[in-house]
Amino acid sequence: HNDEGEAVVFSVPSFACQRRITLDNHNTIITGALSLLAENAELSEEDGRGVAFRRAAAVLKALPEPVTCMTQLRGLPCLGEHSLRVIKDILENGESNEVESMKQSERYKALKVLTGVFGVGAKTADRWIREGIHTLHQLRDSGHALNRAQQAGVEHYDDLNQPVSMAEADAVGEIVEKAVVSVLPGAQITLTGGFRRGKPSGHDVDFLITHPEEGREEGLMSKVVSWLESQGFLLYHKTSRNSYLESANGPARPASNMDRFERCFSIFKLAKKYHELGKDAGPEETKPAGHKPWRAVRVDLVVSPISQFAFALLGWTGSKLFERELRRWAGQEKAMSLSSHALFDNKQKRYLTATSEEEIFGHLGLEFIPPSERNA
Ligand code: DGT
Ligand code: MG
Protein backbone atom coordinates (compact mmCIF):
# COMPACT_ATOMS: atom_id res chain seq x y z
CA HIS A 1 0.00 0.00 0.00
CA ASN A 2 1.16 3.54 -0.74
CA ASP A 3 1.09 6.57 1.60
CA GLU A 4 -2.63 7.21 0.91
CA GLY A 5 -3.45 3.62 1.88
CA GLU A 6 -4.37 2.67 -1.69
CA ALA A 7 -3.33 -0.75 -2.93
CA VAL A 8 -0.17 -0.65 -5.07
CA VAL A 9 -0.72 -1.18 -8.81
CA PHE A 10 1.98 -3.52 -10.09
CA SER A 11 4.00 -3.29 -13.27
CA VAL A 12 5.63 -6.31 -14.96
CA PRO A 13 7.38 -6.55 -18.37
CA SER A 14 5.67 -8.72 -21.04
CA PHE A 15 8.23 -11.50 -21.47
CA ALA A 16 9.18 -13.74 -18.54
CA CYS A 17 12.84 -13.53 -19.66
CA GLN A 18 12.78 -9.79 -18.84
CA ARG A 19 11.79 -10.44 -15.22
CA ARG A 20 13.79 -11.47 -12.15
CA ILE A 21 11.78 -14.30 -10.62
CA THR A 22 13.31 -15.81 -7.49
CA LEU A 23 11.93 -18.71 -5.43
CA ASP A 24 10.55 -16.13 -2.99
CA ASN A 25 6.93 -16.19 -4.21
CA HIS A 26 4.40 -13.91 -2.43
CA ASN A 27 1.36 -15.36 -4.16
CA THR A 28 1.72 -19.12 -3.76
CA ILE A 29 -2.02 -19.87 -3.48
CA ILE A 30 -2.79 -18.15 -6.77
CA THR A 31 0.28 -19.45 -8.63
CA GLY A 32 -0.37 -22.96 -7.28
CA ALA A 33 -3.92 -22.85 -8.64
CA LEU A 34 -2.82 -21.50 -12.04
CA SER A 35 -0.03 -24.10 -12.24
CA LEU A 36 -2.52 -26.90 -11.57
CA LEU A 37 -4.73 -25.61 -14.39
CA ALA A 38 -1.64 -25.48 -16.62
CA GLU A 39 -0.69 -29.03 -15.66
CA ASN A 40 -4.22 -30.29 -16.31
CA ALA A 41 -4.24 -28.62 -19.76
CA GLU A 42 -0.84 -30.16 -20.60
CA LEU A 43 -2.01 -33.59 -19.44
CA SER A 44 -5.03 -33.16 -21.72
CA GLU A 45 -2.72 -32.22 -24.60
CA GLU A 46 -4.04 -28.66 -24.74
CA ASP A 47 -0.62 -27.06 -24.85
CA GLY A 48 -1.86 -23.61 -25.86
CA ARG A 49 -4.03 -23.35 -22.76
CA GLY A 50 -1.20 -24.79 -20.69
CA VAL A 51 1.21 -22.06 -21.78
CA ALA A 52 -1.42 -19.36 -21.15
CA PHE A 53 -1.82 -20.50 -17.52
CA ARG A 54 1.98 -20.85 -17.09
CA ARG A 55 2.45 -17.28 -18.36
CA ALA A 56 -0.24 -15.98 -16.01
CA ALA A 57 1.40 -17.79 -13.06
CA ALA A 58 4.80 -16.32 -14.00
CA VAL A 59 3.35 -12.78 -13.83
CA LEU A 60 2.05 -13.43 -10.30
CA LYS A 61 5.42 -14.94 -9.30
CA ALA A 62 7.11 -11.66 -10.28
CA LEU A 63 5.04 -9.47 -7.91
CA PRO A 64 6.91 -8.01 -4.91
CA GLU A 65 4.03 -8.59 -2.46
CA PRO A 66 0.73 -10.46 -2.12
CA VAL A 67 -2.18 -9.33 -4.30
CA THR A 68 -5.12 -8.13 -2.20
CA CYS A 69 -7.55 -6.79 -4.80
CA MET A 70 -8.20 -7.09 -8.53
CA THR A 71 -7.56 -3.40 -9.28
CA GLN A 72 -3.86 -3.98 -8.52
CA LEU A 73 -3.66 -6.23 -11.57
CA ARG A 74 -4.85 -3.61 -14.05
CA GLY A 75 -2.57 -3.38 -17.07
CA LEU A 76 -0.52 -6.50 -16.25
CA PRO A 77 0.44 -8.68 -19.26
CA CYS A 78 -0.57 -12.33 -19.85
CA LEU A 79 -3.64 -12.33 -17.59
CA GLY A 80 -6.52 -13.64 -19.69
CA GLU A 81 -10.20 -13.80 -18.78
CA HIS A 82 -9.92 -17.31 -17.39
CA SER A 83 -6.87 -16.63 -15.21
CA LEU A 84 -8.45 -13.40 -13.89
CA ARG A 85 -11.62 -15.34 -12.94
CA VAL A 86 -9.53 -17.85 -10.98
CA ILE A 87 -7.59 -15.08 -9.20
CA LYS A 88 -10.85 -13.26 -8.33
CA ASP A 89 -12.29 -16.48 -6.83
CA ILE A 90 -9.20 -16.96 -4.68
CA LEU A 91 -9.18 -13.33 -3.49
CA GLU A 92 -12.90 -13.56 -2.57
CA ASN A 93 -13.19 -17.14 -1.27
CA GLY A 94 -9.67 -18.23 -0.44
CA GLU A 95 -9.81 -20.91 -3.15
CA SER A 96 -10.98 -21.54 -6.70
CA ASN A 97 -13.98 -23.85 -7.12
CA GLU A 98 -12.79 -24.83 -10.56
CA VAL A 99 -9.38 -25.91 -9.30
CA GLU A 100 -10.74 -27.70 -6.24
CA SER A 101 -13.24 -29.73 -8.28
CA MET A 102 -10.59 -30.49 -10.91
CA LYS A 103 -8.29 -31.89 -8.19
CA GLN A 104 -11.13 -34.17 -7.03
CA SER A 105 -12.06 -35.38 -10.53
CA GLU A 106 -11.43 -39.03 -11.37
CA ARG A 107 -9.83 -38.07 -14.67
CA TYR A 108 -7.27 -35.72 -13.11
CA LYS A 109 -6.39 -38.21 -10.38
CA ALA A 110 -5.96 -40.99 -12.93
CA LEU A 111 -3.83 -38.78 -15.21
CA LYS A 112 -1.57 -37.93 -12.26
CA VAL A 113 -1.12 -41.56 -11.22
CA LEU A 114 -0.48 -42.87 -14.73
CA THR A 115 1.81 -40.06 -15.95
CA GLY A 116 3.63 -40.46 -12.62
CA VAL A 117 5.01 -43.64 -14.18
CA PHE A 118 8.36 -42.85 -15.84
CA GLY A 119 7.95 -43.39 -19.60
CA VAL A 120 4.20 -42.69 -19.65
CA GLY A 121 3.08 -39.47 -21.34
CA ALA A 122 -0.28 -37.75 -21.67
CA LYS A 123 -1.27 -39.67 -24.82
CA THR A 124 -0.71 -43.13 -23.34
CA ALA A 125 -2.38 -42.19 -20.06
CA ASP A 126 -5.43 -40.90 -21.92
CA ARG A 127 -5.71 -44.12 -23.93
CA TRP A 128 -5.52 -46.23 -20.78
CA ILE A 129 -8.10 -44.06 -18.97
CA ARG A 130 -10.52 -44.53 -21.88
CA GLU A 131 -10.06 -48.29 -21.33
CA GLY A 132 -11.04 -47.83 -17.68
CA ILE A 133 -7.51 -48.02 -16.25
CA HIS A 134 -7.19 -45.48 -13.41
CA THR A 135 -4.70 -47.05 -10.99
CA LEU A 136 -1.40 -48.96 -11.03
CA HIS A 137 -3.25 -52.10 -9.90
CA GLN A 138 -5.62 -51.83 -12.84
CA LEU A 139 -2.66 -51.22 -15.15
CA ARG A 140 -0.90 -54.36 -13.86
CA ASP A 141 -4.09 -56.44 -14.17
CA SER A 142 -4.81 -55.14 -17.69
CA GLY A 143 -1.98 -57.21 -19.12
CA HIS A 144 -0.79 -54.29 -21.27
CA ALA A 145 2.73 -54.83 -22.56
CA LEU A 146 4.94 -52.09 -21.10
CA ASN A 147 8.12 -50.87 -22.75
CA ARG A 148 11.46 -50.99 -20.91
CA ALA A 149 11.14 -47.43 -19.57
CA GLN A 150 7.61 -48.02 -18.30
CA GLN A 151 8.60 -51.28 -16.62
CA ALA A 152 11.32 -49.42 -14.75
CA GLY A 153 8.78 -46.67 -14.02
CA VAL A 154 6.35 -49.09 -12.40
CA GLU A 155 9.08 -50.93 -10.53
CA HIS A 156 10.51 -47.74 -8.99
CA TYR A 157 7.24 -45.80 -8.82
CA ASP A 158 7.43 -44.73 -5.16
CA ASP A 159 11.09 -43.71 -5.28
CA LEU A 160 10.68 -41.72 -8.50
CA ASN A 161 7.66 -39.85 -7.14
CA GLN A 162 9.54 -38.76 -4.06
CA PRO A 163 11.35 -35.44 -4.59
CA VAL A 164 15.15 -35.52 -4.95
CA SER A 165 16.93 -33.44 -2.31
CA MET A 166 19.94 -31.17 -2.87
CA ALA A 167 22.06 -33.61 -0.79
CA GLU A 168 21.03 -36.45 -3.11
CA ALA A 169 21.77 -34.27 -6.16
CA ASP A 170 25.28 -33.67 -4.74
CA ALA A 171 25.77 -37.39 -4.17
CA VAL A 172 24.76 -38.13 -7.77
CA GLY A 173 27.11 -35.33 -8.90
CA GLU A 174 30.06 -36.99 -7.18
CA ILE A 175 29.34 -40.26 -8.97
CA VAL A 176 28.93 -38.60 -12.38
CA GLU A 177 32.13 -36.60 -11.82
CA LYS A 178 34.04 -39.79 -11.04
CA ALA A 179 32.63 -41.50 -14.13
CA VAL A 180 33.47 -38.57 -16.41
CA VAL A 181 37.06 -38.04 -15.24
CA SER A 182 37.72 -41.80 -15.31
CA VAL A 183 36.81 -42.09 -18.99
CA LEU A 184 38.07 -38.66 -20.13
CA PRO A 185 40.41 -36.68 -17.87
CA GLY A 186 39.85 -32.94 -18.31
CA ALA A 187 36.14 -33.31 -19.10
CA GLN A 188 33.89 -31.07 -17.03
CA ILE A 189 30.43 -31.54 -15.54
CA THR A 190 27.94 -28.82 -14.60
CA LEU A 191 24.76 -29.19 -12.57
CA THR A 192 21.87 -27.67 -14.56
CA GLY A 193 18.05 -27.73 -14.28
CA GLY A 194 16.19 -26.69 -11.16
CA PHE A 195 19.12 -27.29 -8.79
CA ARG A 196 21.22 -24.71 -10.67
CA ARG A 197 18.36 -22.26 -10.12
CA GLY A 198 18.63 -22.88 -6.38
CA LYS A 199 15.58 -25.13 -5.96
CA PRO A 200 15.92 -27.19 -2.75
CA SER A 201 14.43 -30.28 -4.45
CA GLY A 202 13.52 -31.57 -7.90
CA HIS A 203 12.00 -34.41 -9.89
CA ASP A 204 15.39 -35.35 -11.34
CA VAL A 205 19.04 -34.25 -11.45
CA ASP A 206 20.33 -32.68 -14.68
CA PHE A 207 24.00 -32.52 -15.76
CA LEU A 208 25.78 -31.02 -18.73
CA ILE A 209 29.12 -32.54 -19.73
CA THR A 210 31.74 -31.00 -22.01
CA HIS A 211 35.50 -30.92 -22.69
CA PRO A 212 37.50 -27.68 -23.16
CA GLU A 213 39.00 -29.03 -26.41
CA GLU A 214 36.43 -29.13 -29.22
CA GLY A 215 35.81 -32.66 -30.48
CA ARG A 216 37.25 -34.46 -27.44
CA GLU A 217 33.67 -34.92 -26.14
CA GLU A 218 32.79 -37.14 -29.10
CA GLY A 219 31.77 -40.63 -28.02
CA LEU A 220 31.90 -39.57 -24.37
CA MET A 221 28.33 -40.47 -23.46
CA SER A 222 28.61 -44.16 -24.25
CA LYS A 223 31.86 -44.38 -22.26
CA VAL A 224 30.34 -42.63 -19.25
CA VAL A 225 27.29 -44.88 -19.38
CA SER A 226 29.44 -48.03 -19.67
CA TRP A 227 31.49 -46.94 -16.65
CA LEU A 228 28.37 -46.21 -14.58
CA GLU A 229 26.84 -49.52 -15.62
CA SER A 230 29.98 -51.52 -14.78
CA GLN A 231 29.99 -49.98 -11.29
CA GLY A 232 26.36 -50.93 -10.73
CA PHE A 233 25.01 -47.37 -10.58
CA LEU A 234 22.35 -47.71 -13.30
CA LEU A 235 18.89 -49.22 -12.92
CA TYR A 236 17.86 -47.96 -16.36
CA HIS A 237 19.33 -45.88 -19.18
CA LYS A 238 18.46 -44.87 -22.70
CA THR A 239 20.75 -42.72 -24.80
CA SER A 240 19.35 -40.66 -27.65
CA ARG A 241 20.24 -37.79 -29.95
CA ASN A 242 18.82 -34.53 -28.78
CA SER A 243 16.17 -33.44 -31.25
CA TYR A 244 13.76 -31.48 -29.08
CA LEU A 245 12.56 -27.94 -29.92
CA GLU A 246 14.99 -27.59 -32.78
CA SER A 247 12.88 -28.87 -35.67
CA ALA A 248 10.17 -26.20 -35.61
CA ASN A 249 12.63 -23.45 -34.86
CA GLY A 250 14.35 -22.73 -38.16
CA PRO A 251 18.08 -23.13 -38.79
CA ALA A 252 18.95 -22.66 -35.13
CA ARG A 253 21.96 -24.96 -35.12
CA PRO A 254 24.84 -25.95 -37.33
CA ALA A 255 23.66 -29.27 -38.76
CA SER A 256 27.15 -30.78 -38.77
CA ASN A 257 27.53 -30.50 -35.01
CA MET A 258 24.16 -32.03 -34.27
CA ASP A 259 25.30 -35.64 -34.11
CA ARG A 260 27.64 -34.92 -31.22
CA PHE A 261 24.92 -33.63 -28.96
CA GLU A 262 23.71 -36.56 -26.91
CA ARG A 263 21.32 -37.09 -24.05
CA CYS A 264 20.89 -39.97 -21.64
CA PHE A 265 17.74 -40.51 -19.60
CA SER A 266 18.69 -42.70 -16.68
CA ILE A 267 17.63 -44.03 -13.30
CA PHE A 268 20.44 -44.18 -10.74
CA LYS A 269 20.70 -46.62 -7.85
CA LEU A 270 21.77 -44.24 -5.09
CA ALA A 271 23.00 -45.63 -1.77
CA LYS A 272 21.19 -44.13 1.22
CA LYS A 273 23.32 -42.36 3.78
CA TYR A 274 23.64 -44.04 7.18
CA HIS A 275 21.24 -41.61 8.89
CA GLU A 276 18.61 -42.18 6.17
CA LEU A 277 18.68 -45.94 6.69
CA GLY A 278 16.77 -45.93 9.98
CA LYS A 279 15.59 -49.43 10.78
CA ASP A 280 17.31 -50.79 7.67
CA ALA A 281 20.67 -50.32 9.35
CA GLY A 282 20.18 -53.25 11.72
CA PRO A 283 21.28 -56.85 11.17
CA GLU A 284 19.77 -58.58 8.12
CA GLU A 285 17.19 -60.64 10.01
CA THR A 286 15.67 -57.61 11.76
CA LYS A 287 15.21 -55.53 8.56
CA PRO A 288 11.55 -54.99 7.69
CA ALA A 289 10.63 -56.67 4.40
CA GLY A 290 10.66 -54.36 1.39
CA HIS A 291 13.12 -51.86 2.83
CA LYS A 292 16.33 -51.39 0.93
CA PRO A 293 19.58 -49.49 1.52
CA TRP A 294 19.33 -47.54 -1.76
CA ARG A 295 16.85 -45.53 -3.72
CA ALA A 296 16.08 -44.86 -7.39
CA VAL A 297 16.74 -41.31 -8.69
CA ARG A 298 16.08 -39.91 -12.19
CA VAL A 299 19.21 -38.43 -13.75
CA ASP A 300 19.51 -36.65 -17.13
CA LEU A 301 22.94 -36.40 -18.76
CA VAL A 302 23.70 -34.20 -21.76
CA VAL A 303 27.02 -33.96 -23.62
CA SER A 304 27.79 -30.76 -25.53
CA PRO A 305 30.81 -29.67 -27.59
CA ILE A 306 32.50 -26.67 -25.98
CA SER A 307 31.52 -24.41 -28.92
CA GLN A 308 27.85 -24.91 -27.99
CA PHE A 309 28.34 -25.09 -24.23
CA ALA A 310 26.95 -21.62 -23.37
CA PHE A 311 23.80 -22.32 -25.40
CA ALA A 312 23.40 -25.77 -23.86
CA LEU A 313 23.92 -24.38 -20.34
CA LEU A 314 21.33 -21.66 -20.91
CA GLY A 315 18.95 -24.14 -22.53
CA TRP A 316 19.18 -26.78 -19.80
CA THR A 317 18.98 -24.49 -16.79
CA GLY A 318 15.31 -23.63 -17.30
CA SER A 319 12.74 -23.02 -16.07
CA LYS A 320 10.82 -24.46 -18.99
CA LEU A 321 8.72 -21.30 -19.26
CA PHE A 322 11.83 -19.09 -19.04
CA GLU A 323 13.33 -21.07 -21.97
CA ARG A 324 10.14 -20.80 -23.99
CA GLU A 325 9.96 -17.05 -23.36
CA LEU A 326 13.62 -16.57 -24.36
CA ARG A 327 12.91 -18.26 -27.70
CA ARG A 328 9.71 -16.22 -28.17
CA TRP A 329 11.62 -13.01 -27.39
CA ALA A 330 14.37 -13.96 -29.84
CA GLY A 331 11.88 -14.68 -32.63
CA GLN A 332 9.35 -11.90 -32.09
CA GLU A 333 11.53 -9.05 -30.91
CA LYS A 334 14.91 -9.76 -32.51
CA ALA A 335 14.22 -11.90 -35.63
CA MET A 336 16.60 -14.50 -34.22
CA SER A 337 16.24 -18.25 -33.60
CA LEU A 338 17.57 -19.54 -30.29
CA SER A 339 18.10 -23.19 -29.40
CA SER A 340 20.29 -25.09 -26.93
CA HIS A 341 22.86 -25.34 -29.73
CA ALA A 342 23.13 -21.89 -31.24
CA LEU A 343 21.67 -18.48 -32.01
CA PHE A 344 20.87 -17.60 -35.62
CA ASP A 345 20.33 -14.00 -36.74
CA ASN A 346 17.68 -14.14 -39.49
CA LYS A 347 18.47 -10.63 -40.78
CA GLN A 348 22.26 -11.04 -40.98
CA LYS A 349 21.78 -14.68 -42.03
CA ARG A 350 24.52 -15.87 -39.70
CA TYR A 351 25.12 -17.61 -36.38
CA LEU A 352 26.12 -15.45 -33.41
CA THR A 353 28.69 -17.24 -31.28
CA ALA A 354 28.98 -17.03 -27.49
CA THR A 355 31.22 -18.48 -24.79
CA SER A 356 29.05 -17.43 -21.83
CA GLU A 357 25.39 -17.02 -20.93
CA GLU A 358 26.05 -13.29 -20.43
CA GLU A 359 27.08 -13.00 -24.08
CA ILE A 360 23.87 -14.67 -25.26
CA PHE A 361 21.69 -12.29 -23.23
CA GLY A 362 23.77 -9.48 -24.77
CA HIS A 363 23.12 -10.72 -28.34
CA LEU A 364 19.42 -10.84 -27.48
CA GLY A 365 19.41 -7.29 -26.12
CA LEU A 366 18.30 -8.53 -22.69
CA GLU A 367 19.60 -7.67 -19.25
CA PHE A 368 21.48 -10.71 -17.82
CA ILE A 369 19.27 -12.75 -15.49
CA PRO A 370 21.23 -15.13 -13.20
CA PRO A 371 19.96 -18.73 -12.77
CA SER A 372 18.46 -18.04 -9.33
CA GLU A 373 16.18 -15.44 -10.95
CA ARG A 374 15.00 -17.65 -13.82
CA ASN A 375 12.34 -19.39 -11.72
CA ALA A 376 9.44 -18.31 -13.96
P1 DGT B 1 12.55 -30.40 -11.92
O1 DGT B 1 13.55 -31.37 -12.44
O2 DGT B 1 11.15 -30.85 -12.15
O3 DGT B 1 12.79 -30.06 -10.50
O4 DGT B 1 12.68 -29.02 -12.73
P2 DGT B 1 13.69 -28.64 -13.88
O5 DGT B 1 13.55 -27.19 -14.13
O6 DGT B 1 15.05 -29.18 -13.61
O7 DGT B 1 13.06 -29.32 -15.17
P3 DGT B 1 13.60 -30.53 -16.06
O8 DGT B 1 14.51 -31.42 -15.30
O9 DGT B 1 12.41 -31.15 -16.69
O10 DGT B 1 14.41 -29.83 -17.23
C1 DGT B 1 15.53 -29.01 -16.99
C2 DGT B 1 15.60 -27.97 -18.04
O11 DGT B 1 16.08 -28.50 -19.24
C3 DGT B 1 14.23 -27.40 -18.36
O12 DGT B 1 14.01 -26.26 -17.63
C4 DGT B 1 14.25 -27.16 -19.83
C5 DGT B 1 15.32 -28.03 -20.34
N1 DGT B 1 14.87 -29.23 -21.08
C6 DGT B 1 14.11 -30.25 -20.63
N2 DGT B 1 13.97 -31.19 -21.57
C7 DGT B 1 14.65 -30.74 -22.65
C8 DGT B 1 14.90 -31.26 -23.96
O13 DGT B 1 14.45 -32.34 -24.33
N3 DGT B 1 15.70 -30.50 -24.79
C9 DGT B 1 16.21 -29.29 -24.41
N4 DGT B 1 16.95 -28.61 -25.27
N5 DGT B 1 15.99 -28.79 -23.19
C10 DGT B 1 15.22 -29.49 -22.34
MG1 MG C 1 15.41 -31.25 -13.43
Image: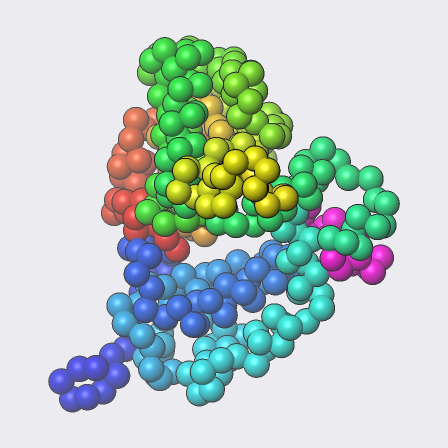
Q: Quadrant of the C terminus?
A: bottom left
- Residue 373 vs 308, above or below: the answer is below
Q: Position of residue 149 (x, y in %)?
A: 68, 36
Determine if residue 20 is in view.
yes
- Residue 216 vs 171, above or below: the answer is above
Q: Quadrant of the N terminus?
A: bottom left
Determine if residue 318 is in view.
no
Residue 330: image quadrant is top left
Q: Nearer the viewer, residue 299 or 11?
A: 299
Residue 75: image quadrant is bottom left
User: Looking at the image, which residue is at 52% across and 79% down?
Assistant: 96
Q: Nearer the viewer, residue 27 or 283?
A: 283
Q: Nearer the viewer, residue 168 or 375?
A: 168
Q: Position of residue 263 (x, y in %)?
A: 54, 28
State which region is magenta. Answer: 119-135
Q: Position of residue 19 (x, y in %)?
A: 31, 56
User: Looking at the image, which residue is at 39% across and 42% down?
Assistant: 275
User: Looking at the image, which residue is at 27% across and 34% down?
Assistant: 359
| 218 inside magenta stretch | no
